[in-house]
Every structure is written in C-alpha cells, then in structure tokens.
Image (cartoon, grey):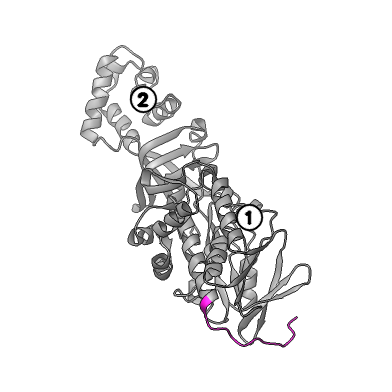
C-alpha cells in the first residue's frame, strides 16, 4: 500500500463523493464502490434537477434548520460549512448563484454539472471508482473494521471504511437501506426509518379538485387538537391525493414517524392582511360588483380553480347576488380565507420522500470524527445516519459536512494493527 493509508468508501452519492475527496486530500489511497451504473444518481434529481447544493447560511442558521439531532452536527458543520463548500466548488470551475431563502444552485441550473464537477475532483485526486459493484458485508475483526466483502466474493482490505450508503428514500436510485444492514451486522443500533420531506395525503374531496394549483406566500399551520405543531409561510401545491410543495415537505418533518390521527391543517390564504383589512377588501370588491352572482365576485381575491371550493366552504349560495350577502355570511367567507381547512390522513411513502428520518443512531457515532464508537476504523456519512433537516439545501449540506469530516478522520486516524484472522 506504498505507506499510504487505504480508505474504502461505500456509496457514490453526495456524502460518499465528498468523503472520498476529503480522504484523498488528506493523503490517503481511496477506493469508492457504487452499486449503481453511475455516481450521484439521487443527486441528479435534487432541486427538481437543478440541484440545490446548499444553503448560504452561517453554522448557527444551518443548525437551526436541522430537525433531528442537530447538536450532533456541530463538529461537522464547523469543519466544513456551506461557504467552504461553495468556495471549493467554484474553485473547481462550477459557478454558483444564490436565490430566495439563501438556496444555492449551479448557474447552469443543471444537477449534472454538479456531478461532473465532483467526478473531475475525484479523478484529479486519483480516487479509484468501481461502478456496478455492490458490497455484501463489512469485514470486522476484534472490534475493528478491516475492509469489505464484495458481492463477487472478493475481499478488499483497508485501514478504514466509510459507509455513505444513503437511506431508503427514492429507492429507484439505489437507496435501499444497505447501510442499515451493515451497521446492524457490526452490532450498532439503527433507528427505524420513516419517509420525511414528503407530501401529505388529505381526507377532503375538494382538495383534488384544485390539483396542480400552486399558492405562494401563504401560511400553513398544523394542529393536533388545539395544539399548534407547525406554522410557516411559503409555497404550497394541491395534488390529486393531497398537498405538497416546500411548506408541506418541511412540515412533514414534524409528523414523520408519528401518528397523524387528529392532525388538521389550516392555510391562511391572505397572511398579509389582518381580518379587518381583509373584510374591508371583500366589501370593496363586493361594492364594485353589487349585482354579480357570488360565484363570480371572487376573481380578484382567488385563483379561478379555488373559487368553487371556497364558495362551497363558505356555505353561501353560489347564485346569490353579492348585494344580498349578509354580514354573517361574509364573515364565514373571511374565516375560510384565513383558515382554509384540511385533514391529514397520512404521509406519502419512501418512493416520494426526499430524505429518510431514522438510520444509524447518533449515539453509536463519535460526532467529532464520524467513527463508530464500538467499531474502530468504521465511519459514517450522510443520510445513513439518523439526521434530517428542512428543505432549502440543508440536507445536502449535512451530506457534504459529514462526508468531509468522515473522509478527513478516516485518513488521519492512527492505523490499527491488521487482524490477519480469516473472516467469513
């Protein structure tokens, strides 16, 4: 091994590629195994194919957007934050731009350009890449990981192994939970995986009638009984099964893995207007169309696709003349506009989940190195760990940061003596 420390990386997604780059930069001989026919298969889909690579925020803001086990990420984020990533990618020839909400994208709006940049980085560093090469199991001896056994039956020995196998979201990209099995085989505990950053299935029959309608700058609130669980402003999309869009995906992190019975949602369609101001606006619109039918009076307030639904929920006869609408009826309309209701029946599955909640327990991993506490020379990075965050590039930054820290640590930690005992 020419005196160099040999590091094996299992998984060629964002975390795995960054781990390989970091380990190579630290002077290690690095070999990367990917079971798919190409690298970055899931990365290609992120940001609707545009790849929201990170969020241009300081570490405290990054941590505040992590929805589970944020404290675990202090060392990772401070070792490699979003600005370090952006500088490195731009130095490697990938121009970036920052959009609303500090979301960072390649200027080209092509996720393929991000993947090409990472592939070039791996190539220039001499990382050996083996595609279509699934790993069967870890080779562990005397509480130390000594390498991997490939599906072909070939053993590959090394000084350290980094598992960056992802979760179980988007299984078509190869995220099928392999890393959980490897971790359990090594005696580590794994938190049950659940889909997260995922759309809601709703109960009401009027939701699908608005399929395809996107609402911007609305406020979504979730309640369990009278207790408010979530409230945030942003964009929401109605679908044939329920609601989706950035607001809903982020809200799903509150519900992921929990019983959704009794969960209701409210959408404030006009958050910029308090009730009195909105009532004045309705009165003004009514005044301009005194003889119009109620169903034809809401065009300035609502998108066309939503009007029949709001008319129905207001319980005002659609054929009633505007000048005949009573104050009580108008206040019912006002309530619908400020508290448009729906009921959550469930969350969509892993096939539509952007990330996985659950994975290798953070209690099993040293947060300062990403090394397993019970098994030496075994490191973890990315979605295989029980970590998740809101939308906006935060989950990819978790992948980059943990990948970087795992790669540096795997390359630099003291070399343990090889175990020569044959492992089955």
Question: Answer yes or no: do the residues labelled 1 and 2 have beta carbons within 8 Å?
Answer: no
Q: Position of residue 187 (x, y in %)?
A: 61, 79
The label nearer to you, 1 versus 2, is 1
Residue at the (72%, 88%) spot, across then down: 421
Q: How many marks do you count on the picture?
A: 2
Q: Which mark is residue 316?
A: 2
Majority secondary structure of magenta residues: loop
| Pointer 1 or 2: first along the chain | 1
Q: Secondary structure at mark 1?
A: loop
Query: To which quarter of the image does residue 14 belong?
Result: bottom right
Position of 157 compared to 370: left or right?
right
Front residue of 326 and 30: 30
Q: Residue 191: in sight, yes or no?
A: no
Q: Position of residue 324 (x, y in %)?
A: 29, 17
Residue at the (31%, 17%) spot, across then down: 322
- Please determine whether, in this image, residue 263 is positioned above or below residue 334: below
Front residue of 305 and 217: 217
Position of 9 compared to 273: left or right?
right
Quick check: is 69 in the magenta stretch? no
Q: Position of residue 295 (x, y in %)?
A: 39, 20
Q: Which mark is residue 10?
A: none
- Say which quadrant the N terminus sits in: bottom right
Q: Position of residue 228 (x, y in %)?
A: 34, 52
Query: To which quarter of the image does residue 188 belong?
Result: bottom right
Q: Residue furthest right?
A: 152
Mark 1 surroundings within 10 Å by alpha-carbon count, few (fewer than 14), some (14 through 19), many (20 or more): many
Position of 10 compared to 236: left or right?
right
Q: Which residue is mark 1?
A: 39
Front residue of 270 and 282: 270
Q: Residue furthest top?
A: 291
Q: Please provide the residue range marked out in magenta.
A: 412-424
């Amino acid at each position: 091994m020419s005196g160099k420390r040999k590091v094996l990386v299992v998984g060629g997604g964002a975390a795995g590629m960054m781990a390989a780059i970091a380990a190579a930069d630290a002077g290690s001989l690095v070999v990367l195994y990917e079971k798919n026919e190409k690298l970055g298969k899931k990365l290609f889909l992120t940001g609707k194919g545009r790849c929201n690579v990170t969020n241009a925020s300081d570490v405290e803001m990054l941590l505040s957007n992590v929805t589970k086990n944020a404290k675990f990420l202090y060392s990772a984020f401070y070792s490699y934050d979003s600005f370090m990533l952006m500088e490195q990618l731009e130095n490697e020839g990938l121009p970036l731009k920052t959009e609303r909400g500090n979301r960072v994208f390649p200027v080209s709006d092509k996720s393929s350009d991000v993947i090409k940049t990472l592939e070039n980085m791996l190539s220039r560093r001499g990382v050996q890449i083996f595609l279509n090469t699934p790993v069967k199991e870890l080779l562990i001896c005397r509480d130390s990981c000594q390498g991997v056994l490939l599906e072909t039956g070939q053993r590959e020995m090394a000084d350290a192994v980094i598992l960056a196998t992802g979760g179980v979201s988007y299984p078509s990209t190869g995220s099928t939970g392999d890393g959980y099995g490897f971790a359990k085989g090594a005696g580590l505990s794994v938190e049950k995986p659940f889909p997260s950053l995922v759309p809601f299935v709703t109960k009401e029959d009027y939701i699908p009638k608005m399929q395809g309608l996107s609402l911007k700058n609305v406020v979504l609130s979730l309640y369990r009984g009278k207790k408010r669980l979530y409230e945030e402003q942003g964009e929401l999309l109605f679908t044939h099964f329920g609601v989706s869009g950035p607001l809903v995906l982020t809200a799903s992190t509150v519900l992921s893995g929990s019983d959704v019975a009794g969960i209701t949602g409210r959408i404030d369609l006009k958050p910029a207007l308090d009730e009195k101001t909105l009532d004045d606006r309705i009165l003004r619109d009514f005044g301009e169309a005194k003889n119009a039918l109620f169903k034809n009076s809401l065009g300035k307030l609502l998108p066309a696709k939503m009007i029949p639904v709001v008319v129905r929920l207001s319980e005002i006869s659609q054929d009633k003349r505007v000048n005949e609408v009573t104050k009580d009826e108008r206040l019912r309309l006002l309530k619908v506009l400020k508290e448009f209701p729906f009921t959550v029946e469930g969350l969509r599955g892993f096939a539509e989940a952007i990330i996985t909640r659950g994975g290798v327990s953070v209690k099993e991993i040293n947060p300062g190195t990403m090394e397993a506490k019970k098994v030496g020379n075994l490191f973890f990075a990315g979605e295989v760990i029980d970590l998740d965050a809101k939308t906006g590039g935060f989950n990819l930054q978790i992948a980059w940061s943990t990948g970087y820290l795992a790669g540096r640590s795997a390359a630099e930690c003291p070399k343990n003596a090889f175990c020569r005992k044959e492992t089955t």
